[in-house]
Structure formats: C-alpha cells, structure tokens
Amino acid sequence: MILSLLLLPSCGGEGNTNQAEELALTIRGEYLALEKLSANVEITADYGQRVYDFALTAAVDGEETVLTLTQPEWAAGLTARLDGESGQLEYDGLILEAGSLDGAELSPATAFPELLEAARSGYMTQCVLEEGEDGGSLLRVCCADPEQNPGEGTETTLWFHPDSHALTRGEISVDGVRVIACTISEFTMG
C-alpha cells in the first residue's frame, strides 16, 4: 500500500479528485493481485506514415500472457506467448510486421501487456471521473515518467469502468503523439 501511495503523488485534476484517487488505488491493488484475466482487444497502431488495425484475444495466467490475433483475417490464429522475460510467435512460419513504435520495445504485440503494467505500477499523474461515450462514468488514469515533462517520453492513459474495474480503453503516446489506441471488451478477471 505504501508503494501505491508513492506512485500517486499528483493524481488530481478536475472534480471528484478524492473519489477518483481512492478508486484508482483500489483498482491498482486489484490489478497487482490479479493472477488471471481474459479480454478482447482492438488495437490501432500508428507508425506515422502507416496505420494498422489489429484485433486479438488476450489471456493472462500468472506470468504468461497469450495473445491470439483475430484480425486481420489473413493472420488470424497467429499467437504470441509472452512470459515477462521473452516472447515467441506461433503460426506456420508466418511473420507479421509489428515493429517498434517507440524505438525500443513498444509494438502492437506488447501494447496490451504495457497497459496492464501501467495499471499495476505506472506513476499516476492524473485520476479523473469523467463521462463515457455511453453516458456512464469512467475513471481515467494517466501515467507517465515523473522525470519527464508532460508530452515527453512515454505516457499511458487508461479508462476503467468504475463499478466492475474492467479496463475498457487504453492509449500510449510517445513524445506527445498517440501511437497505440486500444478498445477492450469482454474483460474478465479471475
């Protein structure tokens, strides 16, 4: 809990700050303890001159994350297994272009695990309860490197359902440019 409080120094902003901060800390604790989850994820990866759309199913069981492409159709079934240390692709020798989006390790294949890592341990810079597209409320949590100025480095924005605590959306920006946008459905914990 002390670590969680240290990672939440300026989780402020618009109204309902205290409620948003408390909810963000509760969700962080749940995601830290989370052993299993599954979800459907739609990913848009923006490489600047090229934009790709992917859809995949995600299953997390302990340290292993299994991501299986469902779209594009020609690559459906391609599976990535990530264990925190390494990863491997499985599918009849097919190689899918999914290079780095930040010059390091961020790619469409690592986007969902990166969102989960931000939910578990990202340095929270802002927590706000806001109205969602469907008229309901969402908790928006922004995470960034505390050593960087806003708009510099990698910044992650997460949206959670305030009742179920399900991750519903996520975006990753590098130097102020959004390179990953995810829409998450059928998010199931446990």
Image (tube, rainbow, N blue to C red):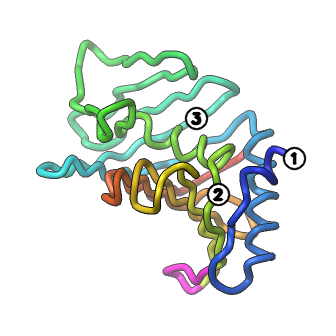
Magenta part of the chain: 130-135
Question: Circle 3: is it few (<14), some (14-19), or many (20+) Cα within 10 Å?
Answer: many
* Label at residue 152: none
Per the image, the residue denoted by label 1 is 2
N-terminal-most mark, 2 or 1: 1
Locate the C terminus and report the quarter of the image it occupies.
Answer: top right
**Residue marked by disc 3:** 59
| Circle 1: residue type | Ile
What is the three-letter code of the residue carrying label 3? Ala
Instruction: Locate residue 33, reporting x and y percent.
Output: 80, 39
Residue 117, image quadrant: top right
Q: Secondary structure at mark 2?
A: strand
Image location (x, y in percent) of residue 116: 59, 44
Q: Which comes before the other along the chain, label 2 or label 3?
A: 3
> Which of the two labelled residues, at mark 1 and mark 3, occupies the earlier sequence position?
1
Q: Nearer the viewer, mark 1 or mark 3?
A: 1
Position of residue 75 measured from the top left corner of the image (x, y, whole percent): 26, 32
**Disc marking residue 124:** 2
Task: Please identify the dominant SS of the magenta region.
Answer: loop
Q: Residue at x 69, y 66 (%)?
A: 10
Assess whether residue 85 is covered by the magenta stretch: no
User: Few, some or many C-alpha atoms within 10 Å of disc 1 (few <14, some 14-19, many ≥20)?
Assistant: few
Mark 1 and mark 3 in contact? Answer it, CB < 8 Å: no
**Residue, far top:** 93
**Callout 3: SS:** strand
Using the numbered discs, state the Cα–Cα distance from disc 1 to disc 3 in whole angstroms.
29 Å
Q: Does residue 61 appear to the left or right of 170 in the view shown?
A: right
